[in-house]
Amino acid sequence: MIASIYMTFLAVAETGSFSKAAGKLFVSPVAVMNQMNELEGEVKAVLFVRTNRGVSLTRAGQMLQTKLLAIKKQTDQAMAEVRAISAKDKVRIRVGASMMRPATLLTALWQDSELLQRNFSLQIIPFDDNQFNAKWLSSVLGTEFDCITSPYDVKEWYKNFCVFKLGEEKFKLAVPFSHPLSQKEILTLADLSHLTILTPPRESPAVDKLCKFIEKTYPNIRTEPLAAFYTANTFMEHPHDILLTRESFKIMSSAFRTIDVEWDFSSPTGIIFALKPLPQAAGFISILKQVLKISP
Protein backbone atom coordinates (compact mmCIF):
# COMPACT_ATOMS: atom_id res chain seq x y z
CA MET A 1 0.00 0.00 0.00
CA ILE A 2 1.26 3.49 -0.82
CA ALA A 3 2.70 5.22 2.25
CA SER A 4 0.50 7.71 4.09
CA ILE A 5 2.55 10.77 3.04
CA TYR A 6 2.08 9.93 -0.64
CA MET A 7 -1.66 9.38 -0.17
CA THR A 8 -1.81 12.84 1.40
CA PHE A 9 0.04 14.26 -1.63
CA LEU A 10 -2.50 12.67 -4.00
CA ALA A 11 -5.37 14.12 -1.95
CA VAL A 12 -3.86 17.62 -2.15
CA ALA A 13 -3.23 17.22 -5.89
CA GLU A 14 -6.83 16.08 -6.45
CA THR A 15 -8.51 18.79 -4.35
CA GLY A 16 -6.10 21.67 -5.02
CA SER A 17 -6.27 22.63 -1.36
CA PHE A 18 -4.54 21.72 1.88
CA SER A 19 -7.73 22.28 3.88
CA LYS A 20 -9.94 20.25 1.50
CA ALA A 21 -7.39 17.41 1.53
CA ALA A 22 -7.39 17.58 5.34
CA GLY A 23 -11.19 17.22 5.39
CA LYS A 24 -11.04 14.26 3.05
CA LEU A 25 -8.38 12.54 5.17
CA PHE A 26 -9.91 13.51 8.55
CA VAL A 27 -6.74 15.27 9.74
CA SER A 28 -5.88 18.91 10.43
CA PRO A 29 -4.74 21.31 7.64
CA VAL A 30 -1.53 21.92 9.63
CA ALA A 31 -0.77 18.18 9.57
CA VAL A 32 -1.25 18.15 5.77
CA MET A 33 1.02 21.16 5.25
CA ASN A 34 3.70 19.65 7.50
CA GLN A 35 3.59 16.38 5.55
CA MET A 36 3.89 18.19 2.21
CA ASN A 37 6.82 20.28 3.47
CA GLU A 38 8.45 17.04 4.62
CA LEU A 39 7.82 15.43 1.21
CA GLU A 40 9.33 18.35 -0.68
CA GLY A 41 12.37 18.15 1.57
CA GLU A 42 12.65 14.40 0.95
CA VAL A 43 12.48 14.60 -2.87
CA LYS A 44 14.45 17.90 -2.90
CA ALA A 45 11.99 19.53 -5.29
CA VAL A 46 9.16 22.08 -5.15
CA LEU A 47 5.93 20.18 -5.78
CA PHE A 48 3.33 22.93 -5.30
CA VAL A 49 2.64 26.47 -6.36
CA ARG A 50 1.01 28.02 -3.30
CA THR A 51 -1.47 30.92 -3.73
CA ASN A 52 -4.29 32.48 -1.71
CA ARG A 53 -6.76 30.52 -3.88
CA GLY A 54 -5.17 27.16 -3.16
CA VAL A 55 -2.33 25.07 -4.54
CA SER A 56 -1.44 23.67 -7.96
CA LEU A 57 1.24 21.23 -9.04
CA THR A 58 4.61 22.18 -10.50
CA ARG A 59 6.02 20.06 -13.33
CA ALA A 60 7.83 18.00 -10.72
CA GLY A 61 4.58 17.64 -8.79
CA GLN A 62 2.73 16.54 -11.94
CA MET A 63 5.40 13.92 -12.62
CA LEU A 64 5.13 12.57 -9.04
CA GLN A 65 1.33 12.48 -9.28
CA THR A 66 1.47 10.46 -12.52
CA LYS A 67 3.92 7.94 -11.06
CA LEU A 68 2.03 7.59 -7.77
CA LEU A 69 -1.34 7.10 -9.52
CA ALA A 70 0.23 4.31 -11.61
CA ILE A 71 1.62 2.68 -8.45
CA LYS A 72 -1.76 3.04 -6.68
CA LYS A 73 -3.55 1.42 -9.62
CA GLN A 74 -1.12 -1.52 -9.59
CA THR A 75 -1.43 -1.83 -5.80
CA ASP A 76 -5.25 -1.80 -5.91
CA GLN A 77 -5.22 -4.43 -8.66
CA ALA A 78 -2.80 -6.62 -6.69
CA MET A 79 -4.94 -6.35 -3.56
CA ALA A 80 -8.06 -7.31 -5.55
CA GLU A 81 -6.26 -10.35 -6.97
CA VAL A 82 -5.08 -11.38 -3.50
CA ARG A 83 -8.64 -11.10 -2.14
CA ALA A 84 -9.97 -13.14 -5.07
CA ILE A 85 -7.41 -15.90 -4.46
CA SER A 86 -8.19 -15.84 -0.74
CA ALA A 87 -11.92 -16.14 -1.45
CA LYS A 88 -11.31 -19.20 -3.64
CA ASP A 89 -9.24 -20.80 -0.89
CA LYS A 90 -11.98 -20.33 1.71
CA VAL A 91 -14.37 -23.17 2.48
CA ARG A 92 -17.96 -22.31 1.58
CA ILE A 93 -20.57 -23.08 4.25
CA ARG A 94 -24.17 -23.36 3.00
CA VAL A 95 -26.51 -21.80 5.54
CA GLY A 96 -30.26 -22.39 5.34
CA ALA A 97 -32.35 -19.31 6.14
CA SER A 98 -36.04 -18.39 6.24
CA MET A 99 -38.32 -15.64 7.52
CA MET A 100 -38.88 -17.42 10.85
CA ARG A 101 -35.31 -18.68 11.05
CA PRO A 102 -33.03 -15.93 9.66
CA ALA A 103 -29.27 -16.49 9.54
CA THR A 104 -28.55 -13.27 11.46
CA LEU A 105 -27.13 -14.98 14.57
CA LEU A 106 -24.58 -16.92 12.54
CA THR A 107 -23.65 -14.06 10.21
CA ALA A 108 -23.13 -11.78 13.21
CA LEU A 109 -20.85 -14.39 14.79
CA TRP A 110 -18.93 -14.77 11.51
CA GLN A 111 -18.52 -11.00 11.13
CA ASP A 112 -17.13 -10.72 14.66
CA SER A 113 -14.62 -13.56 14.21
CA GLU A 114 -11.46 -13.00 12.18
CA LEU A 115 -10.77 -16.73 12.47
CA LEU A 116 -14.09 -17.66 10.83
CA GLN A 117 -13.75 -14.97 8.15
CA ARG A 118 -10.23 -16.06 7.26
CA ASN A 119 -11.19 -19.70 6.71
CA PHE A 120 -14.83 -19.71 5.58
CA SER A 121 -17.37 -17.90 3.43
CA LEU A 122 -21.11 -18.14 4.05
CA GLN A 123 -23.65 -18.86 1.31
CA ILE A 124 -27.18 -18.04 2.49
CA ILE A 125 -29.79 -20.31 0.88
CA PRO A 126 -33.52 -19.66 1.48
CA PHE A 127 -36.05 -22.34 2.40
CA ASP A 128 -39.80 -22.47 3.08
CA ASP A 129 -40.77 -22.42 6.77
CA ASN A 130 -43.88 -24.50 6.05
CA GLN A 131 -41.78 -27.59 5.33
CA PHE A 132 -39.62 -27.27 8.45
CA ASN A 133 -39.73 -30.33 10.75
CA ALA A 134 -37.28 -32.91 12.07
CA LYS A 135 -37.78 -35.29 9.13
CA TRP A 136 -37.20 -32.57 6.56
CA LEU A 137 -34.21 -31.28 8.52
CA SER A 138 -32.63 -34.75 8.50
CA SER A 139 -33.02 -34.92 4.72
CA VAL A 140 -31.45 -31.54 3.91
CA LEU A 141 -28.61 -31.16 6.43
CA GLY A 142 -25.44 -32.37 4.76
CA THR A 143 -27.06 -32.32 1.31
CA GLU A 144 -28.69 -28.95 0.58
CA PHE A 145 -27.40 -27.13 3.67
CA ASP A 146 -24.45 -27.47 6.01
CA CYS A 147 -26.31 -25.82 8.85
CA ILE A 148 -29.40 -23.83 9.87
CA THR A 149 -29.87 -21.35 12.71
CA SER A 150 -33.10 -22.02 14.58
CA PRO A 151 -34.79 -22.50 17.94
CA TYR A 152 -34.21 -26.14 18.88
CA ASP A 153 -36.30 -26.83 21.98
CA VAL A 154 -37.31 -30.40 21.08
CA LYS A 155 -35.75 -33.32 22.99
CA GLU A 156 -35.40 -35.59 19.96
CA TRP A 157 -33.28 -33.02 18.18
CA TYR A 158 -30.44 -33.53 20.65
CA LYS A 159 -30.26 -37.17 19.54
CA ASN A 160 -30.54 -36.53 15.79
CA PHE A 161 -28.55 -33.35 15.24
CA CYS A 162 -25.38 -31.57 16.31
CA VAL A 163 -26.49 -28.31 17.98
CA PHE A 164 -24.49 -25.32 19.23
CA LYS A 165 -26.33 -22.87 21.44
CA LEU A 166 -26.00 -19.17 20.59
CA GLY A 167 -28.47 -17.75 23.08
CA GLU A 168 -31.93 -17.74 24.64
CA GLU A 169 -35.00 -16.05 23.19
CA LYS A 170 -37.66 -14.94 25.64
CA PHE A 171 -41.22 -16.14 25.15
CA LYS A 172 -43.72 -13.38 24.42
CA LEU A 173 -47.38 -13.26 23.41
CA ALA A 174 -48.83 -12.37 20.02
CA VAL A 175 -52.08 -10.51 20.66
CA PRO A 176 -54.47 -9.55 17.80
CA PHE A 177 -54.69 -5.78 17.35
CA SER A 178 -58.46 -6.13 17.77
CA HIS A 179 -58.02 -7.49 21.33
CA PRO A 180 -58.13 -5.01 24.26
CA LEU A 181 -54.83 -6.36 25.62
CA SER A 182 -53.02 -5.24 22.47
CA GLN A 183 -52.90 -1.71 23.91
CA LYS A 184 -50.70 -2.77 26.85
CA GLU A 185 -46.93 -2.29 26.77
CA ILE A 186 -46.32 -5.33 28.99
CA LEU A 187 -48.64 -8.10 30.16
CA THR A 188 -48.99 -9.66 33.58
CA LEU A 189 -50.38 -13.13 34.16
CA ALA A 190 -53.31 -11.49 35.93
CA ASP A 191 -54.15 -9.76 32.61
CA LEU A 192 -54.58 -13.21 31.06
CA SER A 193 -57.09 -14.48 33.59
CA HIS A 194 -59.82 -16.66 31.98
CA LEU A 195 -58.14 -16.43 28.57
CA THR A 196 -56.64 -19.18 26.38
CA ILE A 197 -53.07 -19.13 25.10
CA LEU A 198 -52.25 -21.24 22.07
CA THR A 199 -48.79 -22.80 22.26
CA PRO A 200 -46.52 -25.06 20.21
CA PRO A 201 -46.70 -28.79 21.12
CA ARG A 202 -45.57 -29.54 24.67
CA GLU A 203 -42.93 -31.97 23.46
CA SER A 204 -40.81 -28.84 23.63
CA PRO A 205 -39.31 -28.86 27.16
CA ALA A 206 -39.30 -25.06 27.24
CA VAL A 207 -42.98 -24.84 26.29
CA ASP A 208 -43.90 -27.64 28.71
CA LYS A 209 -42.10 -25.88 31.57
CA LEU A 210 -44.03 -22.67 30.92
CA CYS A 211 -47.38 -24.47 30.66
CA LYS A 212 -46.80 -26.37 33.92
CA PHE A 213 -45.99 -23.10 35.68
CA ILE A 214 -49.23 -21.52 34.44
CA GLU A 215 -51.28 -24.60 35.37
CA LYS A 216 -49.88 -24.61 38.89
CA THR A 217 -49.78 -20.88 39.57
CA TYR A 218 -52.63 -19.49 37.46
CA PRO A 219 -55.11 -22.36 36.86
CA ASN A 220 -57.72 -19.93 35.48
CA ILE A 221 -55.47 -19.38 32.42
CA ARG A 222 -55.89 -22.10 29.82
CA THR A 223 -53.02 -23.26 27.60
CA GLU A 224 -53.87 -25.15 24.43
CA PRO A 225 -51.05 -26.78 22.45
CA LEU A 226 -51.38 -26.88 18.67
CA ALA A 227 -51.01 -30.17 16.82
CA ALA A 228 -47.81 -29.08 15.07
CA PHE A 229 -44.99 -26.58 15.53
CA TYR A 230 -45.48 -23.13 14.07
CA THR A 231 -45.21 -22.52 10.35
CA ALA A 232 -45.41 -19.32 8.33
CA ASN A 233 -49.21 -19.82 8.18
CA THR A 234 -49.87 -20.34 11.90
CA PHE A 235 -50.75 -16.74 12.70
CA MET A 236 -52.99 -16.43 9.62
CA GLU A 237 -54.83 -19.59 10.69
CA HIS A 238 -55.54 -18.16 14.18
CA PRO A 239 -56.30 -14.47 13.58
CA HIS A 240 -58.41 -14.02 16.74
CA ASP A 241 -56.33 -16.05 19.21
CA ILE A 242 -53.51 -15.19 21.61
CA LEU A 243 -50.41 -17.19 20.73
CA LEU A 244 -47.15 -17.90 22.51
CA THR A 245 -44.43 -16.38 20.33
CA ARG A 246 -40.94 -14.92 20.25
CA GLU A 247 -39.46 -11.71 18.80
CA SER A 248 -38.02 -13.49 15.74
CA PHE A 249 -41.56 -14.59 14.73
CA LYS A 250 -42.80 -10.99 14.71
CA ILE A 251 -42.36 -10.68 10.95
CA MET A 252 -44.89 -13.50 10.47
CA SER A 253 -47.55 -11.92 12.69
CA SER A 254 -48.29 -8.51 11.15
CA ALA A 255 -51.93 -8.65 12.36
CA PHE A 256 -50.72 -9.16 15.94
CA ARG A 257 -48.82 -7.10 18.45
CA THR A 258 -45.88 -8.93 20.02
CA ILE A 259 -45.92 -8.07 23.74
CA ASP A 260 -43.51 -8.87 26.55
CA VAL A 261 -44.87 -10.74 29.57
CA GLU A 262 -43.84 -10.56 33.20
CA TRP A 263 -42.37 -14.06 33.31
CA ASP A 264 -38.92 -15.55 33.01
CA PHE A 265 -39.34 -18.23 30.33
CA SER A 266 -37.33 -18.64 27.15
CA SER A 267 -36.10 -21.26 24.73
CA PRO A 268 -32.63 -21.88 23.28
CA THR A 269 -31.67 -20.93 19.75
CA GLY A 270 -28.52 -21.90 17.91
CA ILE A 271 -26.80 -23.54 14.95
CA ILE A 272 -27.95 -27.00 13.84
CA PHE A 273 -25.72 -29.41 11.86
CA ALA A 274 -26.10 -32.99 10.73
CA LEU A 275 -25.03 -35.50 13.37
CA LYS A 276 -22.37 -36.70 10.91
CA PRO A 277 -21.46 -33.52 9.03
CA LEU A 278 -19.58 -33.34 5.73
CA PRO A 279 -15.81 -32.61 5.97
CA GLN A 280 -16.20 -28.89 5.22
CA ALA A 281 -18.87 -28.56 7.89
CA ALA A 282 -16.77 -30.59 10.33
CA GLY A 283 -13.91 -28.12 9.87
CA PHE A 284 -16.33 -25.24 10.43
CA ILE A 285 -17.60 -26.91 13.61
CA SER A 286 -14.05 -27.33 14.90
CA ILE A 287 -13.28 -23.62 14.56
CA LEU A 288 -16.77 -22.70 15.75
CA LYS A 289 -16.03 -24.54 19.01
CA GLN A 290 -12.93 -22.38 19.45
CA VAL A 291 -14.89 -19.19 18.80
CA LEU A 292 -17.70 -20.22 21.17
CA LYS A 293 -15.18 -21.58 23.70
CA ILE A 294 -16.81 -25.03 23.71
CA SER A 295 -14.65 -27.81 25.10
CA PRO A 296 -13.82 -30.60 22.56
Image: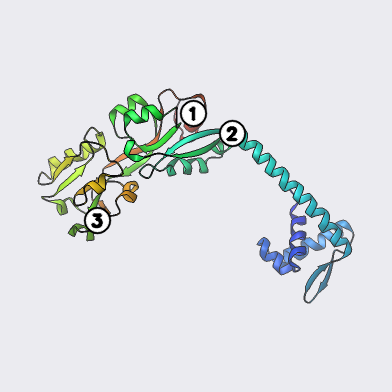
Quarter residue 275 falls in = top left
Residue drawn where x is 24% and y is 36% of the image: 228
In the depicted structure, whether residue 193 falls above or below residue 110: below
In the depicted structure, whether residue 202 falls above or below residue 171: above
Q: Position of residue 107 (x, y in %)?
A: 48, 42
Quarter residue 54 falls in = bottom right
Residue nearest the viewer, comparing 38 with 179: 179
Which badge, 3 or 1, is on the more N-terminal residue? 3
Is 241 placed left or right of 280 in the picture?
A: left
- The amino acid at mark 3 is Ile
Query: What is the CA distance from the residue labelled 1 to the residue labelled 2?
Result: 12 Å
Helix or strand or loop: what does disc 3 sit on?
strand
| Mark 3 surroundings: few (<14), some (14-19) or many (≥20) residues within 10 A | some
- The amino acid at mark 1 is Ala
Q: Which mark identifies residue 186?
A: 3
Report if residue 12 is visible in the image: yes
In the depicted structure, whether residue 166 falls above or below residue 38: above
Helix or strand or loop: what does disc 1 sit on?
helix
Report if residue 264 is visible in the image: no
Q: Name the residue under label 1.
A: 281
Quarter residue 55 falls in = bottom right
Query: What is the CA distance from the residue labelled 3 to the residue labelled 1?
Result: 42 Å
| Mark 2 surroundings: few (<14), some (14-19) or many (≥20) residues within 10 A | some
Which badge, 3 or 2, is on the more N-terminal residue? 2
| Nearer to us: label 3 or label 1 | 1
Q: Name the residue under label 2.
A: 90
Residue drawn where x is 43% and y is 22% of the image: 276
Residue drawn where x is 32% and y is 47% of the image: 249
Q: Are marks 1 and 2 in contact (CB under 8 Å)?
A: no
